[in-house]
Image: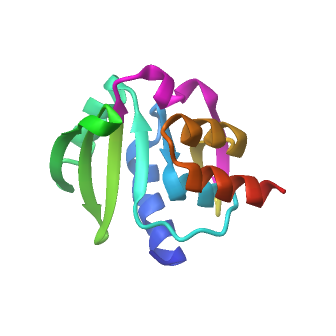
Amino acid sequence: MNDKKFYDILKVLDEKINGLLNYRIEGSGGLKINGMNVVPNDIDVVVDEVAYEKLKKSFKEFIIRERRVEYKGSLVFECEVLDEEVEFWLYDEVEKRMLDRVLLKDFEGLKFKVLSLNAAIEFYSMIGRNDKVKMIKEFLE
């Protein structure tokens, strides 16, 4: 997804998640908000149970499907926003959510909760995404 589309989707997210306490942008979207030069394929948002239910209502016109992803131990609902995929993840294991480790980061005038890059390394190590761990470590060097 190009930078303009990414920003436009973030504006939609900003309107709908404004005021929610327990969420974070993860994946390549979170890395981009942290200043890394990545091209997001989609936007992933990690939430707790309360935010999951609230966002299902807020995004009801965008929802494509809701499903269980056993290998991740998560419930997810997938949306199409401006012709791009946005996924809202509710991990069974609270440790994977890492919602107590978020930072509020500015991205072109919008503020979003993301993990620090060091916390992202911990997360990706936890879920076996060594490719992401390597990419972040190389960026930090």
Q: How many marks?
A: 0
Q: Nearer the viewer, residue 22 or 69?
A: 69
Using the rendered image of the protein, determine whether residue 128 is visible from the camera's viewpoint.
yes
| Image location of residue 36, percent across then percent down | 68, 63
**Left or right for 135, reference 96:** right
| Image location of residue 42, percent across then percent down | 40, 62
Q: Nearer the viewer, residue 37 or 12?
A: 37
Could you say which quadrant of the image residue 100 lies in?
Answer: top right
Q: Nearer the viewer, residue 133 or 100?
A: 133
**Left or right for 110, reference 127:** right
Determine the residue positioned at 57% across, 49% down: 130
Q: Please, is residue 47 above or below residue 120 in the view?
A: above
Q: Which residues are magenta?
A: 90-106
Determine the residue positioned at 34% across, 24% down: 92
| Image location of residue 17, percent across then percent down | 42, 42
Could you say which quadrant of the image residue 86 lies in?
Answer: bottom left
